[in-house]
Image: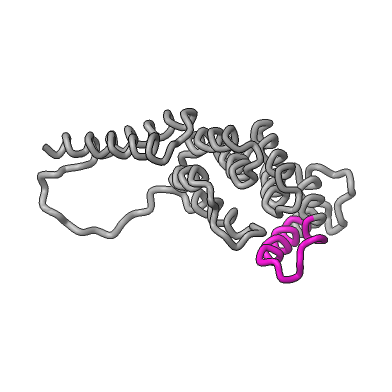
Amino acid sequence: MTWVLVVVLAVVAFIGIAFVLKAPRSGWEAIAAALVLGIAGYASQASPGLPAAPKAASEQVSKDAAAMVDARGKVSDSSLPPSDRWVVIADGLARNGRYGDAAEVLRGAVNADPKNTEAWLAMGNALVSHADGLLTPAALYAFRKAALSDPDAPGPPFFLGLAFAQSGRYAEARQLWSDLLERAPEDAPWRAPLADQLSKLEAFLAGQSGGQGPSSGQSTP
C-alpha cells in the first residue's frame, strides 16, 4: 500500500504542475524526471516498516547551489519576489544541484515570455553551474538576453561579471563591475556586495601583476 500511495502522489503532483499550474510542455520532461528521481530515492533509501528514529538532517547539496539562487534575489532592483512560478520551480531544482533540469524549465519560461529578464538571468546562472563554472556560449547568450530585456537591471552585469571571473576573463569582469558600480544608487542594497567583489578582483589582479594595476587590455592574470 505504501508504494501505491507513493506512485499516486507522484502522478497527482505531475498533473497538478502540468495542467493545474499549466507548466510549459518543454518543462514536462524535467518535472517528470524530478518526480521519478524522488521515487527512485525512496526505493533505494526508504524502509517504511522500520520504527521512526529522529535524526539531525545532513547536508546533501553544496551550499554554493543555494547561495547562487539567494544571491540573485538580493542583486535586484525590485523589492517584490519573482512573480514567475517557473522561475520559482527552477530555483528549487537549482538549489538541489539540478542545474540542467532548471535550465530546461526556464527555457519554457522564456519561450512563453522572451522578455522575462529574471528567467534569462536564472538560466544563465544555471548553465554556468551546469558547466562547473565555465561560461558557455549558451550561458553568455542567456545573460545578454537578460540585459537586453531590462538594460537597467543590475543582475545581468553582476552575474555575467562573476561568470567572466570564474572563466578567467578578469578584465571583462572588472569592466562590467566598474561600469555597474558607477551607476549604482548610493542606497542600492546590492552596491556593497558589488563593491566588495570588485575590490577582491582588483586586489587579485594587482597581486598577479606584482603590485602594478593590470593593463586595460589584460584578460588573464
Dominant secondary structure (helix, strand or loop) of the stretch shown in magenta = helix
- Which quarter of the rendering shows the N terminus? top left
Provide residue 159's location: percent of width, then percent of height.
67, 49
Count of marks placed on residues:
0
User: Would residue 158 be found to the left or right of residue 182 on screen?
Assistant: left
Judge whether 171 appears above or below 53 on screen. Answer: above
Of 54 and 32, the residue lying toward us: 32
Q: What stretch is highlighted in magenta?
A: 180-202
User: Would residue 5 be found to the left or right of residue 208 on screen?
Assistant: left
Q: Name the residue: 38% across, 35% down.
A: 19
Provide residue 179's location: percent of width, then percent of height.
82, 55
Residue furthest bottom as drawn: 187
Of 87 and 134, the residue lying toward us: 87
User: Would residue 206 be found to the left or right of residue 12 on screen?
Assistant: right
Of 41 and 19, the residue lying toward us: 19
Judge whether 164 appears above or below 75 on screen. Answer: above
Looking at the image, what colour scheme do you see? one colour
Q: Name the residue: 45% across, 47% down.
A: 92
Provide residue 121's location: percent of width, then percent of height.
63, 44
Q: Name the residue: 52% across, 51% down.
A: 64
Judge whether 87 appears above or below 27 on screen. Answer: below
Q: Is residue 184 part of the magenta span, yes or no?
A: yes
User: Would residue 178 be found to the left or right of residue 166 on screen?
Assistant: right
Provide residue 185's location: percent of width, then percent of height.
76, 66
Q: Is residue 64 part of the magenta span, yes or no?
A: no
Q: Name the residue: 46% across, 39% down.
A: 98
Task: Specify the quadrant of the image occupied by residue 3.
Answer: top left
Of 210 and 76, the residue lying toward us: 76
